[in-house]
Amino acid sequence: MTADRDDRPEQPRTEPEIIPPGEARRAEALSQMRMRFDERVGVHRIVIVRPGLPWVLLGLIIVGLIAIVATLVIAGLVLLWIPLLIVVVLLVLVSSRLREAVRRLQAWWWRR
């Protein structure tokens, strides 16, 4: 098995990009961008750069606002269902009492 192994270094699969001296400023401008799309004929390139502190803080604020809104919606639904549940329980109790009273009235009517 060791006879099949080749100890030569592996050749790179792609050629390295050589940046001309005048293009150094362009590379710096790219590093300042968050995302950039370049399209040429047959070439698609997306450059993504690590977000800075303001973007991280903005993202945390947005996530916090979404969490607050979700909490308020859930609390509102709970506060809405509590009175509805009380009304339903009261209606069940009243209807059972009313049904009992109607049965007594019918029994009295038929005995007469």
Image (spheres, grey):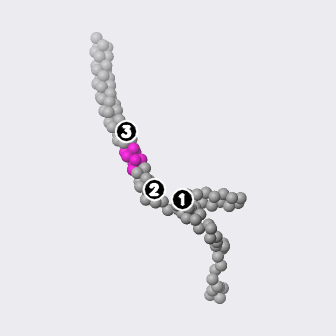
* Label whose residue precedes the other's in the sequence (2 or 1): 1
SS of the residue under disc 3: helix
Horizontal relation, residue 106 to residue 36: left or right: left
How far apart marks 2 and 1 lie (CA) works out to 12 Å
Where is the C terminus found, in terms of image quarters? top left
Q: In the rendered image, which residue does mark 1 sit on? A: 33
Circles 1 and 3, Cβ within 8 Å, touching? The answer is: no
Q: Residue 77, labelled with which disc?
A: 3
Can I make out residue 33 in this image? yes
Give the label on residue 4, or none. Answer: none
Magenta stretch prevailing secondary structure: helix
Please tell me which residue lies in front, 51 or 75: 51
Q: Is residue 109 above or below residue 77?
A: above
In the rendered image, which residue does mark 2 sit on? 55
Mark 3–mark 2 CB contact (< 8 Å):
no
Q: Is residue 108 left or right of residue 77?
A: left
Q: Does dot 2 land on a helix, a strand or a loop?
A: helix
Can residue 5 be seen by looking at this rendering? no
Residue 58 at what x, y percent from top left?
43, 53
Going by the picture, which residue comes out furthest to the right? 41
Give x and y (percent) for residue 53: 43, 59
Front residue of 1 and 111: 1
Residue ID at (58%, 57%): 36
What's the amino acid at mark 2? Trp
Q: What residue span does the magenta drawing correspond to?
A: 64-71
Outermost residue on the front side: it is 22
Q: Earlier in the sequence, mark 1 or mark 3?
A: 1
Q: Is residue 80 magenta?
A: no
Q: Amino acid at mark 3?
A: Leu
